[in-house]
Image (tube, grey):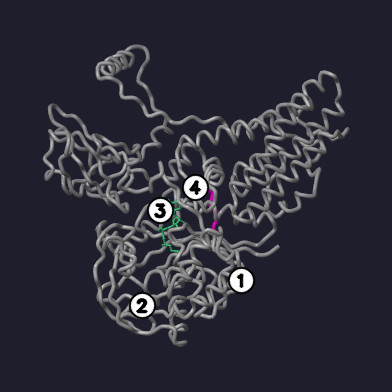
Amino acid sequence: MENFYITTPIYYVNARPHLGHAYTTIVADSISRFHKLMGAETYFLTGTDEHGDKIVQAAEANNQSPQEYVDTISGLFRNLWPDMGISNNDFIRTTEPRHVKVVQEILQKVYDKGDIYFGEYGGHYCFGCERFYTEKELVDGLCPDHLTKPEYISEKNYFFKMSKYQGWLREHILKNPDFIRPERYRNEVLSLLESGALEDLCISRPKSRLTWGIELPFDKDYVTYVWFDALINYLTALEYPEGDKFGKFWPVANHIVAKDILKPHAIFWPTMLKAAEIEPYQHLNVHGYWLIKDTKMSKSLGNVVEPLKMKDTYGMNAFRYFLLREMSFGQDSSFSEEALVGRLNADLANDLGNLFNRTLAMTHKYFGGNVPAPEVEDVIDAEIKKLGQDAMQSFQDNFAQFKFSRALEGLWELVRGLNKYIDASAPWTLFKEKNMDRLSTVIYVLLENMRKIALHVWPVMPDASEQMLEQLGLSFDVNKYNLAKELDVWGLLESGSVVAKTSNLFPRVELPEPKPEAPKAKKQEKAKKAKKNESAEAGPTYAEFEDFTKLDLRVGTVLDVEPHPDADRLLLVRVDLGEAEPRQVVAGIAEFFKPEELKGKQVVLVANLKPRKIRKQLSQGMILAVKSGDGLQLLTTTQPVEPGSKAS
Ligand code: MSP
C-alpha cells in the first residue's frame, strides 16, 4: 500500500473557524483515516496562514499587535480540531522559524536560477484579495470578489517567471488526467492556460507598505507575497529538502482546497515547484462551497454556521457523517439544520441505529447475548454476502477517489439490505419454530456484517465506529484491522463472544425549536406562580451545576455605542471580547445610559447566547445588569481584566 500525504489549506487568521473550514478539515481527516485503515502510512497536515495585509488590518481593527492577534486566532483553529475528531500529525503556522527558513531557501534557489527578476509594475490592487487585478479582470472598475474599488499602485517589485512554465504545466495536466480533480476544475484550469499568455507573478511587497511578511533573502527592503510564502508550507512540514518525511510523503502529496483558491494551487504552485526543481504534487482535490439558502456564508448576513455549535447539538460523529454524505465533492451544497436532522433520522437513527438495536436485542433474546455459530446456510445468506461485498467494494473505490457521498450511499445499500434481510428471514418465526440452526446463521450473518459496517464507517465517524465495535465485543486497533482485506474475509467475529444489550448510538433528533416569546401577561402570570411556588412547599428551583457550565460568561470592553436606528429603548453596543471581530449586542438600556457613558467600560456578557436579530439588528450576546430602584447597574469586575476573560 502506498503512503499518503494529505493537506488542508492553511486558514487565514482574519476570521474565526466556520463550517467551510470544518468541512475541508473533516474531509482531510476522513481520507487520512481511510488510507490508514487500508494499510498505508499517512501524514496529515493543517495549519494557519498568518502573513499579509489582511492580517495586519484585522489586528489593527482589534487593537492588537499582529503577533498577539495571530496567536489568538491560530489558537482557535488549533483548539477546535480535537472537538471535530481531527487527527492531524502536524499543525503549521507560517510565522514559525522552520517555515521562514524553507521559504527563503526556495526563493534563493529560484532567484539564483534566474527565474525571479526585478521590475516595475502598475496595477489595480485589492487589499481584500491581496493581489493586483488587470483592467480586464475588474467588473465595472471594481474587484469582482469584494465589489470595492481597488487602489492603483505603481511600484518596483520582484517577479516570478511563471509564464516560462505555462507550456510545461499544460502538458503535465494533459498527461496526468487526475492531477486536478474532479474534472470540471481540471477543465477550468486548462482553459485558463489555453486562453492566453500567463502573466508573471509579482512575489514581493515593499517594506514601505507592508512589513508583516517573510523578508526576501536577496533584498531586505522587501517581504514575500503571502501566497508565495503560504504554499510552501506543504514542503516545510515535511522538512524539505533533507527530511525523511519529504522523501516518503512528497511523491504522494494530495492537497484539498475549495474552488476559491483553485488558481494559486493549480497554477502558481506547480510552476513554483517546477522552478525550484521539485516534482509536482500528486493530486489537487477541489471541492465546492457550502451555501446557506443558496447564498454565501458571511458575517454581515449573520448566517455563519459554527461547527462547535453543530457538534454540541448533534454530536461530532453525526455532524461529520452529514457533511460527507450531503455534499457531492466538487459541487456546491446547501447547508440547513432541517436537512441535517432529516438525514440523521433517516440514515443513522432509522437505518443504522435500528439495525444495531434490533440485532443486539435478538442476540440477547435468543442466545443470551452470545454470538451464535453459523450452521445452515441458505440462498438468502449468499445473496446478502454478495450485496455486502459489492457495497464494501463500492465504498472503498469511491472513497479513494474522494467521492464520499457515493461511498456512503454504497455502504448504506448493505445497511438497508440487512434490515430487509431481518424482515425476510423473520428470526422471531424461526425461534417459535425452534429452528435454531437457521436462527444461528441469520444472527451470525447480521452480526458479522455489522462488524464490517462498523469498521468501514471509522474514517467518517471514528468514535461511533469504535463504540459499535465495542458493542460487538471487539476493541478497535487501527493496526489490527485492514479494510481492503474485509472484501475477502468472512467469519472474523468469534462465536461465543458477548455483545452489548442495546446500542442507542444514534437516537432520533429534532430540530431545536426557537422558543416562542410568551405574551407579556402570560409571562407575568407565570412569574407570579413561580414565586408563589418558591415561597410555598416547592422550595427554590435549583439549576444543576452542569446547566451553569453551559453558560459562557465573559468580560468585555465596550468599544463604541450607538442608538438603535429603529427603537428608542435599545442601544447597539460593540464589545471587544478579544476575538477577531467585536460583538454587537442589542441592549435595552437606552433609558439608563447615554452611549458615551458606556464607552471603555468593562461589562459581563453571556457570550454563547444564540445570536438573534432584534429589530433587524444582530445581537451576539447579552450584557448582564442589575435593577436597582429606578435605575440600572451593569455588572463588572473590581479591576480591569483582559477582554474575553471567562467568568466562573
Ligand atoms: N490562506 C489561504 C489558503 C492558503 S493555502 C496555502 C485561504 N484561507 S481561507 O481561510 O480563506 O480558507 C479557504 C478555504 O476554507 C477554502 O479553500 C475551503 O477549504 C474552506 N472554505 C471556506 N469557506 C468555505 C465554504 N463556504 N464552503 C466550503 N469550504 C470553504 O484561502
Q: Which residue is mark 1?
A: 175
> With respect to residue 43, does 519 lie above or below?
above
Image x and y of residue 513, in percent: 41, 28
Instruction: Specify which label sits upstream in the sequence, 4 or 3.
Output: 3
Q: Nearer the viewer, residue 159 or 16?
A: 159
Image x and y of residue 78, in percent: 45, 56
Q: Specify whether residue 31 is in view.
A: yes
Question: Of the residues shown, which amino acid type is indicated by label 1?
Answer: Lys
Question: Of the residues shown, which amino acid type is indicated by label 4?
Answer: Asp
Image x and y of residue 292, in percent: 41, 43
Q: For ligand 1, which image quadrant applies?
A: bottom left
Real-space Cα separation, disc 1 to disc 2, in angstroms: 37 Å
Q: How crowded is the residue under tag 2: few (<14 C-alpha within 10 Å), some, or many (20+)? A: many
Image x and y of residue 10, in percent: 45, 61
Write the start and end of the magenta stretch as one range.
Answer: 83-88
460 left or right of 448?
Answer: left
Q: Which residue is mark 4?
A: 83
Query: Which numbered disc, 1 or 2, marks the residue closer to the eye?
Result: 1
Instruction: Specify which label sits upstream in the sequence, 1 or 2.
Output: 1
